[in-house]
Amino acid sequence: MSDAEHTPGFTTGLEIRREVMGDDFVERAFERSRGTDSEAMQEFVTEHAWGAVWSRPGLDRRSRSLLNLGMLIALRAENELRGHVRGALRNGLGRTEIVESVIHCSAYCGAPAGLAAMRVVQEVLEAELGPLSDSSGTSDEA
């Protein structure tokens, strides 16, 4: 789809998607799909999920990110979860809230879904925020 063919919903969606997921993520998604069968899916998701849903009033982006984490954990959609954990950080969720969302979902979605999600979350959090500091209570300080 050329720029001239983009609908207002696509344009709005692309702006929101870039703000939440980051320019690099969005560029890679479009680049990987360009000229393939999945190109239309990238355009659909941008126009409808990002342009029509994420732009609606009533929920802030932080709340939408938390909802997305829960849905992606339940669906065991690890690839999508990876990007949305980064988006959740951009939208103001902290490490503890993201980890607690996985634990909460585990009670309803099962331990296998929770464990799979926690692997993704840990990978992203360590890449974005660094490893969790040693909080075992032991210290060399006197």
Image (spheres, rainbow, N blue to C red):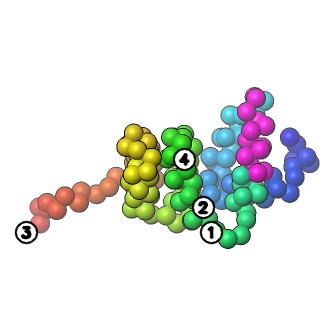
Q: Which residues are magenta?
A: 36-48
**Mark 2 touching mark 1, by CB under 8 A?**
yes
SS category of the residue bearing label 1: loop
The percent position of residue 21, horizontal first and vertical second, equals: 61, 53
| CA distance for labels 2 and 4 | 12 Å
Residue 21's label in the rendered image is: none
**Mark 3 touching mark 1, by CB under 8 A?**
no
Residue holding disc 2: 64
Residue holding disc 3: 142
| CA distance for labels 3 and 2 | 45 Å
Instruction: Tell me if residue 85 can be seen.
Output: yes
> Is residue 73 on the magenta stretch?
no
Q: Residue at x 43, y 62 (%)?
A: 97
Q: Amino acid at mark 4?
A: Leu
Q: Amino acid at mark 3?
A: Ala
Q: Residue at x 76, y 56 (%)?
A: 51
